[in-house]
Amino acid sequence: MEGTGASGGFLFSLPILFILIYIVLFGVGVYCLILFIQLARRGIQALDLYIAEKKSEKGGRQ
């Protein structure tokens, strides 16, 4: 009598499923990191423009 039938196949594929989930989560993490870096760069550029505008505005009033 074999006790591993269909459940044996499921138990064999379970670690493979976990590895695939980890790979997908790693990919999503890298993608989120890239999006965050792009957002930070845009924020820095916007801040630079704001500072330049305030400096030119301040210089024009004096």
Image (tube, rainbow, N blue to C red):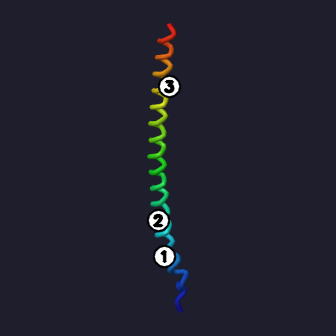
Q: Dot 1 surroundings within 10 Å: few (below 14), some, or many (20 or more)?
A: few
Question: Which residue in the structure is indicated by mark 2?
Answer: 20
Q: Secondary structure at mark 1?
A: helix
Q: Amino acid at mark 3?
A: Tyr
Q: In this picture, is 6 found above or below 40?
A: below
Q: Residue at x 53, y 84 (%)?
A: 4
Q: Residue furthest top?
A: 62
**First of labels 3, 1 by sequence position:** 1
Distance between mark 2 and mark 1 Cα atoms: 14 Å
Q: Are marks 2 and 1 in contact (CB under 8 Å)?
A: no
Q: Secondary structure at mark 3?
A: helix
Q: Dot 2 surroundings within 10 Å: few (below 14), some, or many (20 or more)?
A: few
Question: Which residue in the structure is indicated by mark 3?
Answer: 50
Q: Check residue 12 in the rendering and tell me which mark sits there, or answer none.
A: 1
How far from the left and from the top, in percent, is residue 23?
45, 60
- Judge depth for marks 2 and 3 and give the one in front: 3
Q: Amino acid at mark 1?
A: Phe
How far from the left and from the top, in percent, is residue 45?
45, 31
Q: Secondary structure at mark 2?
A: helix
Q: Residue at x 46, y 17 (%)?
A: 56
Distance between mark 3 and mark 1 Cα atoms: 58 Å
